[in-house]
Image: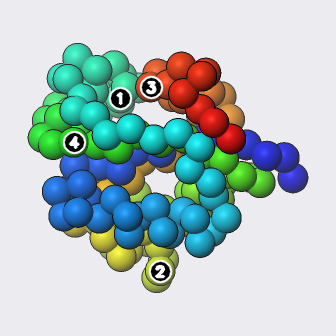
Amino acid sequence: MAVERTLSIIKPDATRRNLTGAVNKCFEEAGLRIVAQKRILLTRARAEAFYAVHAERPFYSDLCDFMTSGPVVVQVLEGENAIAKNREVMGATNPDDAAEGTIRKLFAENVEANSVHGSDSPENAAIEIKFFFEDDEIVG
Ligand code: CMP
């Protein structure tokens, strides 16, 4: 297994409920290392650009509204098999389908306000990390 990096976002529903530390605890207990992290407010244009792949989906506009409704914490997580491991720790997109003990099962409010985002492939991880971080902001 290779050491990978993946992009994580703690979403506004979680920052609003002061769950940043609780979510980070889940990552660290799973062996993922937070090698970059910043709390930001996404502009509408930036949220639209980040989720451009979903532009044709019916939930796109609501999703961009939600992602700009409060602070998000963008992060780079590093570890063995980090992309798949993070997706395992997050659980299914819809908390109704998420396994017990996963972040979304524990904390998500619904399929939109689902507390966390994680890259779904090595290609997207590289693109998404670059979207938010300069190389010298990531310290492994
Ligand atoms: P995320 O992993 O950030 O990727 C796309 C996001 O769109 C997803 O998490 C959810 O927040 C949101 N999403 C996906 N499916 C739906 C849906 N059916 N209805 C509303 N929001 C959705």
Residue 77 at x, y percent in the picture: 59, 47
Which quarter of the figure has residue 50?
Answer: top left
User: Disc number at residue 51?
Assistant: 1
What residue is drawn where x is 17% and y is 56%?
16
Q: Secondary structure at mark 2?
A: loop
- Determine contact: label 3, label 4, CB under 8 Å: no
Left or right of 119 on screen, residue 67: left
For the image shown, how many numbered marks are present on the structure? 4
Nearer-N-terminus badge (2/4): 4
- Determine contact: label 2, label 3, CB under 8 Å: no
Q: Secondary structure at mark 3?
A: helix
Three-letter code for the amino acid on which mark 4 is drawn = Pro
Report how far apart the C-alphas of labels 2 and 3 lie in the structure.
28 Å
Q: Is residue 97 above or below residue 47?
A: below
Which quarter of the figure has residue 89?
Answer: bottom right
Q: Which residue is mark 2?
A: 101
Report how far apart the C-alphas of labels 2 and 4 lie in the structure.
25 Å
Q: Which residue is mark 3?
A: 132
Report how far apart the C-alphas of labels 4 and 1 lie in the structure.
17 Å
Nearer-N-terminus badge (2/3): 2
